Amino acid sequence: MTELPSYDQLPPAPEGGRSGWGIFGAQDNVGLINLLTPERVLDAVRLIRRGALFPLDAPLDAFTPPIAATRGIPRHHVLHAAGTFGFDDVYDNFFPQGSSQWDSLGHVGYAPDAFYNGATEDDVATGRRNTIEHWARHGIVGRGVVLDMVRTLAEEERPYDPGTSTAFSVEDLELARRRSGVEFRPGDILIVHTGFASWYLGQPMGVRAQLSRTYATPGIAPGEEMCRYLWDAHVCAVASDTFAVEVFPPERGTALGFLHRMLIGQFGMALGELWWTEDLAADCAEDGIYEMFLVSVPLNAPGGIGSPPNALAIK
Amino acid sequence: MTELPSYDQLPPAPEGGRSGWGIFGAQDNVGLINLLTPERVLDAVRLIRRGALFPLDAPLDAFTPPIAATRGIPRHHVLHAAGTFGFDDVYDNFFPQGSSQWDSLGHVGYAPDAFYNGATEDDVATGRRNTIEHWARHGIVGRGVVLDMVRTLAEEERPYDPGTSTAFSVEDLELARRRSGVEFRPGDILIVHTGFASWYLGQPMGVRAQLSRTYATPGIAPGEEMCRYLWDAHVCAVASDTFAVEVFPPERGTALGFLHRMLIGQFGMALGELWWTEDLAADCAEDGIYEMFLVSVPLNAPGGIGSPPNALAIK
Amino acid sequence: MTELPSYDQLPPAPEGGRSGWGIFGAQDNVGLINLLTPERVLDAVRLIRRGALFPLDAPLDAFTPPIAATRGIPRHHVLHAAGTFGFDDVYDNFFPQGSSQWDSLGHVGYAPDAFYNGATEDDVATGRRNTIEHWARHGIVGRGVVLDMVRTLAEEERPYDPGTSTAFSVEDLELARRRSGVEFRPGDILIVHTGFASWYLGQPMGVRAQLSRTYATPGIAPGEEMCRYLWDAHVCAVASDTFAVEVFPPERGTALGFLHRMLIGQFGMALGELWWTEDLAADCAEDGIYEMFLVSVPLNAPGGIGSPPNALAIK
Amino acid sequence: MTELPSYDQLPPAPEGGRSGWGIFGAQDNVGLINLLTPERVLDAVRLIRRGALFPLDAPLDAFTPPIAATRGIPRHHVLHAAGTFGFDDVYDNFFPQGSSQWDSLGHVGYAPDAFYNGATEDDVATGRRNTIEHWARHGIVGRGVVLDMVRTLAEEERPYDPGTSTAFSVEDLELARRRSGVEFRPGDILIVHTGFASWYLGQPMGVRAQLSRTYATPGIAPGEEMCRYLWDAHVCAVASDTFAVEVFPPERGTALGFLHRMLIGQFGMALGELWWTEDLAADCAEDGIYEMFLVSVPLNAPGGIGSPPNALAIK
């Protein structure tokens, strides 16, 4: 693979920002996950030193009532298996974006009927383009880099409440990166630890329920500076323990004010939400090592819009 | 961890065979997956040489009509996401054992009301013991070893039809192992390639439908010799591309005639079924290397009986 | 409405039998339920003498394991209602043909792509033609006439086992009709009591499960004589407590050997299956009155293929 | 049945209002539907003069987005029926209170753990008491009486917007009743036409969505005067085309401020919501007859909390 262009070398996109379409070919449905080449897998493998495993998926039924009121937790039935003393089980109402998740490249478009790499709404809805199985069949394996916003802000003595619409600027991310002692490399999987998931799980139902009205959740700041920063870092994915990676509610009406439109719809970047990063972040704080092997195996779900990440960090 | 006893050192179990209960403590819900220690993770990591990824999950909707008529493929809905030009999705009728899967230790007991490690039927049905989240929270990472029964039998010039109840004896498995040039090590994840899944996917619907009447599928042979062989190899898991790991239909009435009862109910061994092993087996045949790094991240599904393996082999 | 033609006046249908298409206009989706005019409602009302109610729906979860293995009983969840000390509930896996049911005119066609009144497969699958809401919006109210096959055969001293493929001939139905003292009138809703449902509910699971292999259930005999008899009686519906109204398994390959193809696909006749007729039949035997007011309100389910009848007989 | 006591003769209930528990025996699960005796069925039959049918169920998928955000419209799948050129169908996410509905006596209690007739929360959640099948097995047949609030207020020249929290007082109901020329009789099924359902169905999605935030819907006024009025009228049911029969949002904290607690939890009265009353009300306005035969056959759903009414008015 030749080197990626810089953000400012990309052609402008019609509703603001710049366009990453076509970089991996007109028919590509994988996006920046293409950066996860065998060489980068081998580079990441070298980061495994202790054999310590960090599962990154919260329980499927953790986030209830749902923040997005149109989702919900699965309904689970345990069934006696036919012809034996044993059990089967079955789920209904299983929203693959109801707990820890990847957004596929079909989740949000850049503009109406303009999804990543020129896919139409119909391409996505019928499973012809950009859906989750493309990542399942590629495999997501590479270097994870943890940016711990909670400890970064605490060290800066800046007050921070994970139950609010706090935006992390490029400068904030850079503070966290420098604190980690890591330089970005193409194909990195950024893990932005905000403390939101563990805060949420400690709240009573009434407080949780408020979120489906306000959507007040922390995350990275919108705007072109953030787009340039993430693209030029050549990260293939940003995963976080917050609702939407970016601060919410967004400014949906503009492409640069609602980063999903740019990051998914133009860059083909994988966004991971509501991941369980608490244990991994604590371990990084303890051993001072913020880079690790990361593997994620999304469901091989033809036509799927999202998936639990089924992710594991290994240090 | 001290060394595991041999099969003949285990205490006898009341309905035949021997008992592995209590080895990891009276409260254990993880079984032989406990063998996957950090040291064994590190040993397995050394097997990664090329950075080549082999996803091992068949599509969620591949096996239809279902072989077990009480299961089925998921019903999938793509939904317009509230407040944006984008999509969400939701599944109903999602049987985690409907395609590639792990059986949790709650799937089949040794005897009525006698599940692995002394759990009751009620313990399993209510999610108190043996359910799938215990493996999700531990992580499944170790050495995979491929036993390719298709190529082994072909080289022996023995006729073989993957659409029949063909039983693979201990001797057959040993032939395949020797052919692989691998010695078993504690904690190995055995991958028994039978050719069933790719045969099935090439059949017309009428032939597939017959299977829900006959259950005629290949797999390892029942009996005490097989139990002794697998226990003494100290493998933690056996995964296969066939319906039930063991040959079907089984002799359900006896503990040694229906291996699920022994392997899951007494040994606490992980059984993986309907995995997609075709590409991995072909690669092993090509490079002659039958051991590899294997990672699987089951769904973090509290109280779950089964899960897609979300598995990846890395060579 | 002008009088209906006789069976022998109908034009021949291409794969056998005769065709009822076009009688109520080219765009009709209601079929013989059109016979239930206000005048016939008023005629039926006069049959109410005691104010006695006979609900005709079996419980939604009565028929398990399902006779048609591709159906099943609903999965029911009771949920705490948001913001109150109360409950809501929700069903998944709700097959409207899983218990007492109407087949809509979209359930079975006369021939591939040839459904009642010329509808295509696509017309039905997309809900444009023949689906259940047309009856819900019309209302099904008229005279019910009970033909009690159990008591008729017993009086004839003919052995009869409701757990077998017993076919009731036109002669048998005529015996039952004469025994009832009823002359057919256009728009009658025939209720053929076979004793199957109460037999089934008294069987152990193993016996019930056999049915999904054999489909051995009693019902009216196939063939042209039966078609002529039912058409010339000008009944609008035949409901029964057996699996398929007609004896099963049918001879699917011929239009006259599988009556669904003729009765639904050509005549536009409503077929009711697995109704609970035991109490009504017993009452008829007691008071000797075999005609009654009958009301059924199918679910107003746009695009629906079947529905519980939600039926009540009033005497 | 002996005559019912008057409201002021009932014993006081602990959190306000008076108690109807025990009137039909300690084990009763049917409530005021017990008033629908064969004699009252016969009285109602006499109201059928024209044979005109008025289906009272809105389509199952009419109310979306749902007013109660924890409900939703069914997900419907049309399936090819096994072994024939025909179709089956299946529903997931079927909320029996998602469109036109009855609240069973298990829907809301008088107080925490105090449901109609002394049932506990556990009695309801496990289907032992008060659930919907008791009405399905009794049958709901009697006299319907329409109170048309829309035309009553229009004649009074009072401004009225069905999209607001408008409360109808006892005086308002009396105005409508006198206008109808009807005297209440024990067992009457009151049908309060508010115009809400037809207003809702004419609104764009944005306006509809607001309702899940505000719950601003019209209905009968709370308070003891209303309880006394409805009890002393000895109506067995109140059905309406509005969200909750009573004006919403209610004052949930007091028993007399949230009528569900009194009417369902103490009186055992059937409440019908989101019924389609537009056509029936228009017909009453035209012929000046506001009483009619009414039949409703709820789903025979063991343990069910709600059901579509499957209701038909016949004039």
Image (tube, coloured by chain):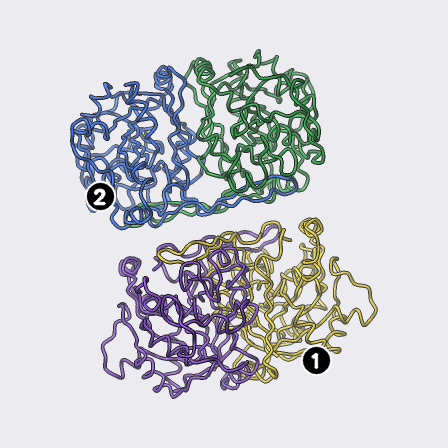
Chain colours: A blue, B green, C yellow, D purple
Q: Which residue is mark 2?
A: A250
Name the image quarter holding residue D257: bottom left
Name the secondary structure under disc 2. Answer: loop
Q: Is residue B238 above or below residue C237?
A: above
Name the secondary structure under disc 1. Answer: helix
Q: Which residue is mark 1?
A: C287
- Tell me the subunit letter for badge 1: C
Specify whether disc 2 shares its chain with disc 1.
no
Name the image quarter holding residue A192: top left
User: Where does the image place residue C178, in percent across and percent down from the top left?
Assistant: 75, 78
Mark 2 or mark 1, whichever is nearer to me: 1
Q: What amino acid does circle 1 point to?
A: Asp
Q: Nearer the viewer, residue D150 or D59?
A: D150
Task: Classify residue A148 as left or right of residue C284.
Answer: left
How many callouts does the rendering have?
2
Q: Residues within 10 Å of mark 2 (few under 14, many from 20)?
A: some
User: Where does the image place residue B229, in percent across and percent down from the top left?
Assistant: 65, 19
Q: Is residue B105 above or below residue D65?
A: above
Q: Are marks 2 and 1 in contact (CB under 8 Å)?
A: no
- Tell me the subunit letter for badge 2: A
Q: Nearer the viewer, residue B296 or D19?
A: D19
Task: Classify residue C150 as left or right of residue D91.
Answer: right
**Residue shown at 60% from the left, 15% from the top:** B177
Residue D31 shows in this picture: yes
Task: Classify residue D190 as left or right of residue C52.
Answer: left
